[in-house]
Amino acid sequence: MIPYRKQAMPYSHAPRPTASPAGPVDIRLVVTDMDGTLLDDDKKVPEGLWETLARLRERGVLFTPASGRQYATLAAEFAEVAEGMVFIAENGTYVVRDGEELSSDPLAPGVVARVRETVRGLTADGADVGAVVCGKRSAYVERADEAFLAEVGRYYVRHRVVEDVTAVDDDIIKVALFDFGSAERTTAPALAPFARTHQVVVSGEHWVDVMNRTANKGAALRALQRELGITPAQTMVFGDYLNDLEMLDAADWSFAMANAHPEVVRRARHLAPSNNDNGVLRTVTRLLDL
């Protein structure tokens, strides 16, 4: 399989998504992925984000980040405006509002040990791969080299190096594997046996996540919609990668970024400009007439 590499995709190449109307539309909930979607390729928030969030709050529109990142990382990113926000963290396995858990989907005992054995097999075959065991309180790793920890720190600001990731005292909600090569080509196929009982999702060019089958961003979003009394027709969602597919299905206003994976483009109803072109905020401000 040839690994997917992110690149801007001209609108004319998309067979399904359509141009969105000029607006305004009745939206009560805006949900966006972070990396490759809201953030640019340098992992920076777009210009005008905080002003836009203030206007959304004035309108009574809830803005919700939905990411593979841990809750602590998301909360730190939005610290100045986090009050009342809902964070869909760890690809939907952990949902938090104002520090209170709304939902979670922990892994059963034994899964971490099995994934660790897969990682050891990959490294024995020459792959440069490391595992991040994601708990509610922290992330845990056994690998301590500087290059790996630098990648971990991007998405897991709260992480610890431990001798044995199977012995940590925490509720484990996800195991993420970072592959310095191609996650889609090398690591994901090695995790195929887990797909019979768990969900294995490629969440980026270098990342693969192992979660419960019931866990994904879409399931978390649908639960949030039910709790808030918000319909799919009142929900706007933005995504770029395969871990965003289910949440695109939960919104009538689903947008693939111009830089999105081809499968995401096929699944979404509309297209937005790329993450490097401030696509999320440009679309939100236009359609909500902010």
Image (tube, helix red, strand yellow):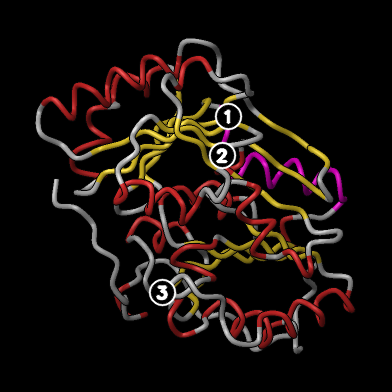
Image quadrant for the N terminus? top left
Q: Mark 3 or mark 2, which is nearer to you?
A: 3
Residue 81 position in % (x across, y down): 79, 69
In magenta segment, residue 39? no
Dot 2 corresponds to which residue? 216
Image marks 3 and 2: residues in contact by CB distance under 8 Å: no
Residue numbers of the magenta segment: 214-229
In the rendered view, tell whether residue 168 sits above or below residue 146: above
Q: In the image, what residue type sits under mark 2?
A: Asn
Disc on the earlier residue, 3 or 2: 3
Q: Mark 2 or mark 1, which is nearer to you?
A: 1
In the rendered view, tell whether residue 212 sits above or below residue 78: above
Dot 1 corresponds to which residue? 173
Give residue 145's mark: none
Tell which of 35 and 249 is nearer to you: 35
Disc on the earlier residue, 2 or 1: 1
The local crowd at label 3, few if under 14, some if 14 to 19, many if 20 or more residues have their Cα within 10 Å, is: few
Q: In the image, what residue type sits under mark 1?
A: Ile
Dot 3 corresponds to which residue? 42
Tell which of 248 and 65 is nearer to you: 65
Instruction: State how far apart marks 1 and 3 are (Cα).
Output: 28 Å
